[in-house]
């Protein structure tokens, strides 16, 4: 017989179940096999309603009266044991021991106690196998600790699969492992961070930006708060850092390439937050001054929250560009920055944030003449075979990226013009990044 009397509802994740590992769990074959044990006894309660029936006449050890079936389980995985059980009206109520375990010495097992009544009940238990795979497994019903009848039916053991963490879109999900009964999907920005202005190369120290040449790092993601802090993603063809879930800070280490930032008057960074509740959210950037030693001596901090100017705002790029020549406002700590060896970014309480264009500068921009030198001309656009690049300045190198952010072409040029063969590329939109006299720019083109 089939009785489905329970419903499992989870708020934050969805559980999926694979095939039943138990054979003849409903006993409808009318035979005991492949069940075994001295409690294996299939009976027909009428109208081909087959169940396993055992009547315990004397109290003993739970395992003295047993019903088992060998199954294959894997250590580390979670399984759900489900069955229907009841006793007779005379017995009224009694306990049984059920679970999953080894079918040989040392007989390790994970068990639960079920309280039976004369009314059929469906019981469900989940177990994560933790005793290894050295000995084969079984499903266990130990009945010997109490007297009276035990009727068992509809036995199943299935692996529990967390569909919210299986790397595919399934169930009620609206994205991969998100949406529906899983956690909400993270909606990434569709617009890239604002493009920084063209500045003299000597007037910029770039930590992370496609607009400038970044300094050499000792460890760009030093794991200060446990694990990798960010993942690099592409937003509208622009490299951007996305905060990894649960990591509240990002440590950037360049101890082997320390920077004297005394003459740099401003710090800049862009961030984009999608949190619906900004209470307690912060985006703080810290310049760590070693002062000629092997560790932090002082620090200059720029602290942004919901009450500062600029302030945290959801669902738009916030550009922070503030002077660091005096304390006050969002600037705190110590102004000494002659030996900066690290930068720390704190994103406490922020769930979803992207950031880009972290750099220091002297508040200067290129003259119109210099800016024109750093511009690049691409033609024809769209193109099917040859893409021409021209600039008034020296094109040092180029890199071409697809919409997934994968580099598909990289060339050293060192010329003011170049013909790039793109015939082998698939049709689509690409971004070509050019380094012209130390200034990096990005331009899209279409491959037909």
Image: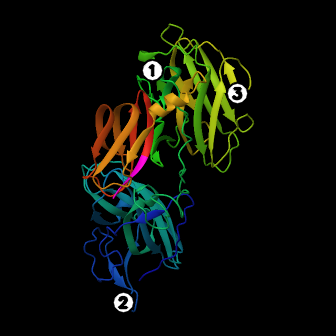
Which is the main secondary structure of the residues drawn in magenta? strand
Q: Are marks 1 and 3 in contact (CB under 8 Å)?
A: no
Q: Is residue 89 left or right of residue 418?
A: right
Toward the viewer: 259 or 284?
259
| Percent position of residue 313, x then y | 68, 44
Q: Which secondary structure, mark 2? A: loop
Q: Is residue 445 magenta?
A: yes
User: Can residue 96 be seen in the rendering of this structure?
Assistant: no
Q: Earlier in the sequence, mark 2 or mark 1?
A: 2
Specify the segment rendered in magenta: 444-448
Q: Earlier in the sequence, mark 1 or mark 3?
A: 1
- Which mark lies nearer to you, 2 or 1? 1
Toward the viewer: 245 or 216?
216
* Residue annotated with mark 2: 48
Marks 2/1: CA distance? 76 Å
* Residue annotated with mark 1: 254
Outermost residue on the bottom side: it is 47
Q: Earlier in the sequence, mark 2 or mark 3?
A: 2
* Residue annotated with mark 3: 330
Marks 2/3: CA distance? 78 Å
Toward the viewer: 16 or 333?
333
Marks 1/3: CA distance? 24 Å
Q: Is residue 406 magenta?
A: no
| Percent position of residue 90, x then y | 52, 78
């Amino acid at each position: 017989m089939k009785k489905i009397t329970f419903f499992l509802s989870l708020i934050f994740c969805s559980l999926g179940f694979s095939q039943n590992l138990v054979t003849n769990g409903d006993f409808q074959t009318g035979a005991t096999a492949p069940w075994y044990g001295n409690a294996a006894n299939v009976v027909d309660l009428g109208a081909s309603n087959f169940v396993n029936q055992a009547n315990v006449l004397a109290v003993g050890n739970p395992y003295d009266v047993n019903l088992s079936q060998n199954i294959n389980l894997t250590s580390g995985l979670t399984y759900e044991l489900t069955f229907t059980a009841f006793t007779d009206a005379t017995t009224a109520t009694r306990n049984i021991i059920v679970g999953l375990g080894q079918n040989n010495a040392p007989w390790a097992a994970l068990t639960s106690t079920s309280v039976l009544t004369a009314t059929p009940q469906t019981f469900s238990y989940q177990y994560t196998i933790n005793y290894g795979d050295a000995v084969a497994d079984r499903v266990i019903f130990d009945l010997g600790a109490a007297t009276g009848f035990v009727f068992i039916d509809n036995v199943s053991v299935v692996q529990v699969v967390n569909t919210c963490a299986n790397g595919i879109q399934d169930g009620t999900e609206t994205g991969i492992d998100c949406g529906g009964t899983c956690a909400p999907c993270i909606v990434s920005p569709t617009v890239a961070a604002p493009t920084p202005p063209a500045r003299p190369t000597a007037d910029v120290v770039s930590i992370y930006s496609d607009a400038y040449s970044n300094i050499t790092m000792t460890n760009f993601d030093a794991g200060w708060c446990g694990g990798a802090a960010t993942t690099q993603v592409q937003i509208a063809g622009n490299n951007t850092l996305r905060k990894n879930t649960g990591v509240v800070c990002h440590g950037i280490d360049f101890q082997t390439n320390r920077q004297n930032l005394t003459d740099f008057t401003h710090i800049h960074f862009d961030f984009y937050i999608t949190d619906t509740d900004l209470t307690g959210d912060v985006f703080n950037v810290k310049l760590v001054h070693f002062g000629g030693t092997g560790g932090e001596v002082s620090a200059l901090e720029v602290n942004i929250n919901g009450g500062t100017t600029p302030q945290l705002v959801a669902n738009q790029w916030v550009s922070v560009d503030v002077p660091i020549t005096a304390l006050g406002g969002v600037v705190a700590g110590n102004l000494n920055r002659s030996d900066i060896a690290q930068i720390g970014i704190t994103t406490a309480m922020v769930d979803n944030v992207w950031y880009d264009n972290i750099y220091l500068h002297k508040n200067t921009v290129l003259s119109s003449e210099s800016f024109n030198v750093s511009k690049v001309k691409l033609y024809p656009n769209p193109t099917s075979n040859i893409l021409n690049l021209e600039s008034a300045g020296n094109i040092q190198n180029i890199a071409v990226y697809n919409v997934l952010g994968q580099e598909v072409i990289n060339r050293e040029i060192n010329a003011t013009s170049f013909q790039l063969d793109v015939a082998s590329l698939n049709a689509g939109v690409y971004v070509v990044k050019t380094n012209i006299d130390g200034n990096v720019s990005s331009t899209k083109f279409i491959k037909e």
